[in-house]
Amino acid sequence: MGMSEITPFKLLMSREKALETIMEHIKPVETAELIPIERSVNRVLARDLVAAMDIPPFDRAAMDGYAVKAEDTYGASEFSPKTLKLVGVLRAGESTSREIKNGECIRIATGCPIPPGADAVVMAEFTEENGESVSIYKAVHPLENISLRGEDIKKGEVIIREGEILTPAKIGVFAALGIRKAPVYRKPRVAIIPTGVEVQDLGLKLSGGQVYDVNSYTLASLLLENGASVTRAPIIPDSYEALRAALYRYIDHDLIVFSGGSSVGERDMLADIIEEDGKLLFHGVQIKPGKPTLFGTVRGKPVLGMPGYPASCLSNAYVFLIPIIRKMARLPPKKPTTVKAKMAKRIVSASGREQFLTVRVVDGKAYPAFKKSGDITSLSKADGYVILPVNLDVIDEGEEVTVTLFE
Amino acid sequence: MGMSEITPFKLLMSREKALETIMEHIKPVETAELIPIERSVNRVLARDLVAAMDIPPFDRAAMDGYAVKAEDTYGASEFSPKTLKLVGVLRAGESTSREIKNGECIRIATGCPIPPGADAVVMAEFTEENGESVSIYKAVHPLENISLRGEDIKKGEVIIREGEILTPAKIGVFAALGIRKAPVYRKPRVAIIPTGVEVQDLGLKLSGGQVYDVNSYTLASLLLENGASVTRAPIIPDSYEALRAALYRYIDHDLIVFSGGSSVGERDMLADIIEEDGKLLFHGVQIKPGKPTLFGTVRGKPVLGMPGYPASCLSNAYVFLIPIIRKMARLPPKKPTTVKAKMAKRIVSASGREQFLTVRVVDGKAYPAFKKSGDITSLSKADGYVILPVNLDVIDEGEEVTVTLFE
């Protein structure tokens, strides 16, 4: 064995090219599911919502007052009221088939159907009721203070389109139409497969040389927040057989993510497994941290191999996994929130790779938070990151940088 | 009966004053619950996380290579390698108690515990292995390529503080420490009580004069998205007895919201019910839409009465309910996203109230979306809203406005 034992990365790519390559192979979810409308905020409507009824379902009073024939009020004023005969009362929820004739009115609550014969409502504040007669102090024109049937939503109208993201207001449209469940695209299903003989699941005791599984939890939480449904697979050893078996066991998912198992050395078997029955599209990305990342497709399913180191793995998830999931879920790309800050100390980087430098922002100054690729606190104590391009080796103290915040 | 039948609003307030009054009476949730870490993004940590172990738990190799005594490599270079005896191999997950003596090395995989006696790791790419000996082409200094025990997280260190919002990276800290559940403040519990004899629940048939319950669904969806847990109560009639019974039935919640039941006329009984055993803090807000809003406390619990009209109710929820819930959930205030646009047509408003004008933004132009207070499409077809101050009655066509987007 010698230096040649260390297998080089097979297809090293820039971040932009890697992301482009991935996105070309990501398809939005096609199947729909019905879910309760109040749980459907931020889900994507899977088919046009066509109104099956008019809203309002009937001509209704837009104000508390008196339903009248408008012509009976013409000329009415504060000093010269018209007097109408009160022939009925409609409280909230009530309706009547009693037709209003000239000279008559019916007291009506907001929302009640307009009685036959009436064509306007006089607001209560411009009236005075005296037993069986009502004085009208203000003229109304026909249709005044009436919401017409179908004025809000017309039967047959496409009121929300397929592909629209549901909001509380759009959920209100479903409710107004009496619909309890909305047809939305189902969430993309992601299998996360943590690998490594040294990796132990939480809650169990560590023995010599073991560490806890961090990646399947950080990835799961990030994915859940971005609209995925997640299967955390049991931890498997980095053996060819175990990796291969896990890949095919979870191949029914929309995306299979391995954490660990894509580094150089003894662990690049995943690249070979993908090539066996699928296509390896890149192996290695020119970013730091996060180089040992690979992507391919097997039986049409995208397979992502993430670095084993927690900070590298999660940092790469922000770069690659969020765009993947949002495209699958048909959500728009996430707009990153950025702030300007001045670098609190001089940074020298000679990695020859694009670098994600995690920083903590305090009083407009960016303090490097990055310690080592293996360190989870490089991220947990950071507010965001600064990207150092491949050809930039130095950022001077006090130099302005753009910090992309973790959210 | 006459004009005096229409009860005036008891305590009319400006929006700013109303919001301030509400917020003074809102207390953050105090009790905690344990939830699986992968479901804890955006939840608030309820007590300091103190590390119960060092991370890494042992000194470990930061690179694939050879564990050595650094002094044995001094002077090594590409042209003048040092030769060490290979006395062992540590693959991922393995560890050894074999002590390294001068002149010896052990092949070691990234992450493995450093064998006793070794104080540095030479990266594999600067070595050549030949059977039982290894040529070292580069000198290392003590601790080079070693991650020291506790370097990332020190046992006893407060690593995440009470009150911090959990992120995927912070969830990674829990995982690294082997902790499966995080203690977070429980979600504020909100009861939504829809009122109105004319209001019918979804899925049931409408009879004459009935409309579907929209508000409990729009409010529930908005609340769920902002960190609340929600109880949707059955629809109750606007009677004194029913309102009162419902209030006390749900008084164990952190917030009780009535929709409808706070307007003038036959429906301002809620104000009286609050005053019976609690305190009415305002009744009526100088905004349009959304005037018939009230707020008080009963037995220390905040009670909010929202307008019955769907668009007014939801528009008010953006103004009042989101700040309430986020304060209760200990989340920071939501930063609204705004865009500049030019008004597409002249707007005349003479309401004498601050006005929320919903708009649709197309190609930098803001088109009014508002139809009537009763219309749900005033909101569902809008991208956001423009606020017209109390004293502003006209916006000219082409005038620049700030649109706050619905999100």
Image (cartoon, coloured by chain):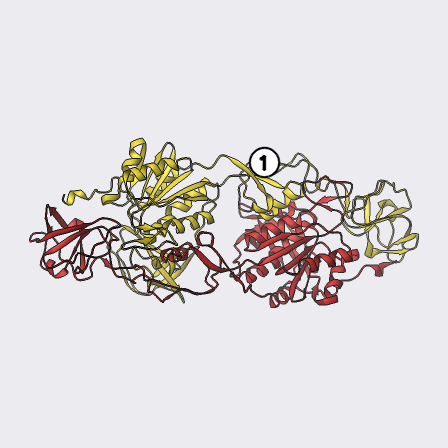
Chain colours: A yellow, B red
Can I make out residue B136 in this image? no
Taking the image as shown, residue A12 lies to the left or right of residue B333, namely left
In x, y percent, where is residue A25? 38, 36
- Secondary structure of residue under mark 1: loop
Viewer-proximal residue among A367 and B137: B137
For residue A84, above or below residue A48:
below
Q: Which amino acid does label 1 sit on?
A: Asp
For residue B225, above or below residue A254:
below
In x, y percent, where is residue B341? 55, 51
Q: Quadrant of residue B208?
A: top right
Q: In which quarter of the image is residue B192?
A: bottom right
Q: In which quarter of the image is the C terminus of chain A?
A: bottom left
Viewer-proximal residue among B288 and A175: A175
Residue, disc 1: A48
Few, some or many C-alpha atoms within 10 Å of disc 1 (few <14, some 14-19, many ≥20)?
Answer: some
In x, y percent, where is residue B403? 56, 53
For residue A56, above or below residue A65:
above
Q: In which quarter of the image is the N terminus of chain A?
A: top left
**Residue at 31% in and 39% down:** A242
Residue occupying the far left of the picture = B80
Chain containing the residue with disc 1: A
